[in-house]
Image: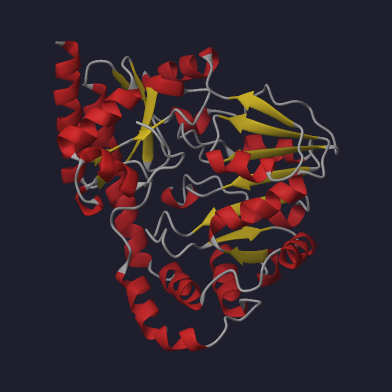
């Protein structure tokens, strides 16, 4: 399987291996909401097609105002971007000014891309270890909400103003959710803390642990958000950063003009007000995630970990890349291997939570492969 992709969602690669068209692939590798895109986004795009003949507002005042209303922060504390990946690049440039950067691993591969773009002294802080696994096992014997009790790893250094930290919450690919109260003391220990909250939207208000409510108190805090995963709009490329205006003005000077197109900006304002889609997603996720978790737990050789997000990390007693290949060829289903996460390797894979019927199709495909590989 040459030219293995580093990210999920590479349907052209999967289709070539499966010997089918990309449209025939059922994609569990990209953690995108299967209920979208919402109708509100499509209607907004159609309504603003005429705006293609003019340049976007370089300051994105309307989009910033929409985001400011949702998060109750001043508009100047928000910077929209061409996906959170673009903003991660400028976060990487800011992080590179520090003597040492700490990264909680395993980590989203684009973090290394952004950090390696600039000269950095990177220290990896592994989350997945024997202690973590034991906490998972203890939690599974309790109320099943172990991830709400997992603090920021105590292996993080005390830090100082010459050090910086990059982490995501919920954590990808493990699904761990760090408590807000355990992250807050960390903000006083580093010169800059960048928290990627790309999957925080998937948590209901009573469980989410976002730091947006405290961002105005910490000029050294940057929060990255994505609108493409929850609203199933990855092709539009839309994310935003929330941070001190001085920092965001500096980022604005570094980047190309007009990074967000007019259709993406219009769709964003529409979906942010779409409460029906938000409620539909929350109702779907809790039940569908439980269905997938229980089903995976019953398959021999597979060990799923509880997750706060819309994906599950699965430990496998067999090669995940081999399982991935067999699933593609036999069932036209794509899962995310974890070979690009050096801390995990070929005995882990990640699957998105999809609809009940699609989850069942995955479980049946995996069951056939487990039986075949056991025989």
Which residue is located at x 45 percent, y 68 percent?
A: 272
Q: Quadrant of residue 64?
A: bottom right
Front-lying residue, 12 or 186: 12
Q: Give left or right: position of 314 versus 173.
A: left
Position in image of residue 47 (x %, y %): 38, 85
The correct choice, above or below, for 198 with respect to 258 in the image is above
Which residue is located at x 76 percent, y 67 percent?
A: 253
The correct choice, above or below, for 369 with respect to 214 in the image is above
Which residue is located at x 37 percent, y 66 percent?
A: 275
The correct choice, above or below, for 106 with respect to 22 in the image is above
Which quadrant is home to the N terminus? top left
Position in image of residue 244 (x %, y %): 75, 60
Q: Quadrant of residue 243?
A: bottom right
Which residue is located at x 42 percent, y 74 percent?
A: 270
* Visible residue check, residue 27: no
Which quadrant is home to the C terminus? top left
Front-lying residue, 1 or 101: 1
The correct choice, above or below, for 109 with respect to 72 in the image is above
Position in image of residue 54 (x %, y %): 54, 87
Q: Give left or right: position of 258 versus 122.
A: left
* Visible residue check, residue 291: yes
Position in image of residue 221 (x %, y %): 72, 49
Q: Quadrant of residue 370?
A: top left
- Residue occupying the far top of the picture: 375
Specify how the rendered protein is coloured: secondary structure
Please tell me how many numbered marks the rendered image carries. 0
Q: Give left or right: position of 216 versus 44.
A: right
Front-lying residue, 243 or 375: 375
């Amino acid at each position: 399987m040459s030219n293995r992709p580093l990210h999920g969602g590479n349907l052209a690669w999967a289709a070539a291996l499966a010997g089918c068209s990309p449209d025939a692939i059922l994609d569990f590798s990209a953690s995108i909401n299967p209920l979208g895109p919402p109708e509100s986004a499509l209607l907004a795009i159609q309504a603003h097609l005429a705006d293609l003949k003019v340049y976007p507002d370089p300051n994105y005042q309307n989009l910033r105002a929409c985001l400011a209303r949702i998060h109750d922060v001043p508009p100047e504390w928000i910077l929209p971007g061409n996906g959170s990946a673009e903003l991660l690049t400028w976060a990487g440039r800011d992080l590179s000014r520090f003597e040492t950067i700490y990264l909680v691993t395993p980590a989203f591969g684009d973090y290394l891309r952004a950090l390696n773009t600039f000269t950095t002294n990177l220290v990896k802080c592994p989350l997945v270890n024997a202690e973590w696994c034991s906490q998972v096992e203890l939690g599974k014997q309790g109320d099943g909400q172990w991830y709400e009790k997992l603090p920021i790893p105590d292996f993080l250094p005390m830090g100082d103003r010459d050090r910086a930290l990059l982490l995501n919450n919920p954590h990808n690919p493990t699904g761990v959710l760090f408590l807000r109260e355990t992250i807050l003391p960390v903000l006083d220990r580093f010169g800059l803390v960048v928290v990627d909250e790309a999957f925080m939207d998937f948590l209901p208000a009573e469980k989410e642990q976002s730091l947006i409510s405290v961002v105005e108190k910490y000029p050294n805090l940057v929060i990255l958000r994505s609108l493409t995963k929850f609203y199933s709009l990855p092709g539009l490329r839309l994310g935003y950063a929330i941070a001190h205006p001085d920092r965001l003005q500096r980022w604005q000077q570094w980047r190309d003009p007009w990074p967000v197109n007019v259709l993406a900006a219009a769709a964003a304002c529409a979906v942010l007000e779409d409460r029906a889609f938000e409620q539909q997603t929350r109702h779907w996720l809790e039940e569908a995630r439980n269905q997938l978790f229980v089903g995976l737990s019953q398959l021999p050789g597979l060990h799923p970990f509880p997750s706060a997000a819309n994906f599950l990390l699965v430990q496998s007693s067999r090669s995940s890349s081999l399982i991935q290949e067999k699933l593609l060829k036999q069932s036209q289903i794509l899962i995310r291997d974890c070979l690009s996460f050096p801390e995990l390797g070929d005995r882990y894979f990640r699957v998105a939570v999809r609809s009940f019927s699609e989850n069942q199709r995955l479980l049946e495909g995996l069951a056939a492969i487990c039986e075949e590989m056991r025989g």
